[in-house]
Image (cartoon, rainbow, N blue to C red):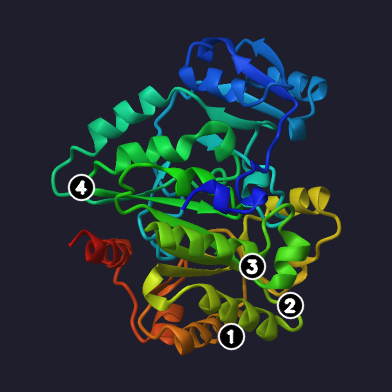
Amino acid sequence: MTSAAVPNNYSRSLFRPTTVLVEDEAADCPLVESIIERLPNAEVVVVKRPTGADLDRLSQEFGPLTTLLLARHRGRFLKACPGTAETYRCCLYQILHLGLGCNIGCSYCVLQGYLNNPFITQFVNLDDAFAELDRELKRPGTFYRIGTGEFTDSLFMDPLTGLASRLLDYFGRCPNAVLELKSKSVAISGLLDYPGEIGETIVSWSLNAPRVCAQEEGHAATIEERLTAAALCRQRGYRIGLHFDPLLDFPGWEDEYRQTVASIFTHLKGDDIIWISIGAFRFMPQVKEVLKENHPQTNITAGEFIRGLDGKQRYFSAIRRRLYRFLVTEIRRYAPNVFIYFCMEDQYLWQDTFGRAPADNQELGHWLDKCCYRYHG
């Protein structure tokens, strides 16, 4: 399977910046040159490391929505998922922090309340990232599930960066780690054209109801496009993950989510899917005003919410229960044995929905590790 067999929009980056800001201390990184070569019409401006007031000034001079910042990351690349509070079960996922932000523009995106950098940012000191992975992954007896889709979309800019093939080169040689690429885009040409062994890489798509996709997910690919891309990746040999997060409560949600589940299984078989995660809409209180300012047309924060034990606004448990029970029942109709788990949910709803609950985060992490072990043998 090659990109020539894929419709053009499956090979195209969702982001075509007109300006590229290059941090002076990052200018010698090879990734900078390769990205600029793919953007022959973009203005390239070298800047000193921007922080605080510098970012404000640059954002006024260069439009954040059309500007890419290429920078050197100075902290740790491999980080624990931020959702590790014991109150709500977390699977102990590890994040490979290679970039910040995306231009898809989902109304519910939590990043809009956290990031103080207005620019989509690509970290270009990849040698440092791989050196850190070399050190970390040598820890004996530890298995790692690692993803790149927490602070950015894993694929939306891949035709510009070529990162997917670099990551495949690395993780294809790791016996104690699997890579998950999570996206709402369909820029999969790099995955399909990759000439080497793909190892146990998982390519995942966030899914939602068609109405949510149309009204709340900005420039994201349609549900049909995402599932077509998933089927193409499965044909190439990748494992497929699916993530229903955030589930939203709105009039007619049952029919809408039923439609998405039915679409999944016109493109994929249950055995094609390594896991499906589910999580209801939740947000930190301070995000509400930013969300309303950035997306004045949305009313997703107008539902019945209560402040959870982690400080986030969450639907009342009765609403979450209805959403979860319905979706799990629909999925089980098509794929009785597929592994389904909650992202950041409490013990009561685990037990109520599945009839069992992980005792702690470590046990949930072990359950997901076992999904990977099936394919590692």
- Residue where numbered disc 4 is placed: 175
**Residue 322 circle label:** 1
Between circles 3 and 1, the one closer to the viewer is 3
Going from N to C along the chain, the mark reached first, 2 or 4, is 4
- Whole-number angstrom distance, CA of label 4 to CA of label 3: 34 Å
Q: Nearer the viewer, residue 144 or 259?
A: 259
| Quadrant hosting residue 159 | top right
Going by the numbered disc 3, the residue's amino acid type is Glu
Contact? badges 1 and 4 (CB < 8 Å): no
Give the crowd class for mark 4: few <14, some 14-19, many >=20 residues within 10 Å.
few
- Whole-number angstrom distance, CA of label 2 to CA of label 4: 44 Å
**Residue 250 circle label:** 2
Give the crowd class for mark 2: few <14, some 14-19, many >=20 residues within 10 Å.
few
Q: Name above or below for residue 281 compared with residue 63.
A: below
Going by the numbered disc 2, the residue's amino acid type is Phe
Going from N to C along the chain, the mark reached first, 2 or 3, is 3
Going from N to C along the chain, the mark reached first, 3 or 1, is 3
Looking at the rendered structure, the secondary structure element under dot 1 is helix
- Residue where numbered disc 3 is placed: 224
The reply to whether residue 185 is visible in this rendering is: yes
Q: Is residue 258 left or right of residue 139?
A: right
Give residue 292's position: percent from left, percent from top.
80, 54
Q: Name above or below for residue 166 compared with residue 322.
A: above
- Whole-number angstrom distance, CA of label 2 to CA of label 1: 12 Å
Looking at the rendered structure, the secondary structure element under dot 4 is loop
Give the crowd class for mark 1: few <14, some 14-19, many >=20 residues within 10 Å.
few
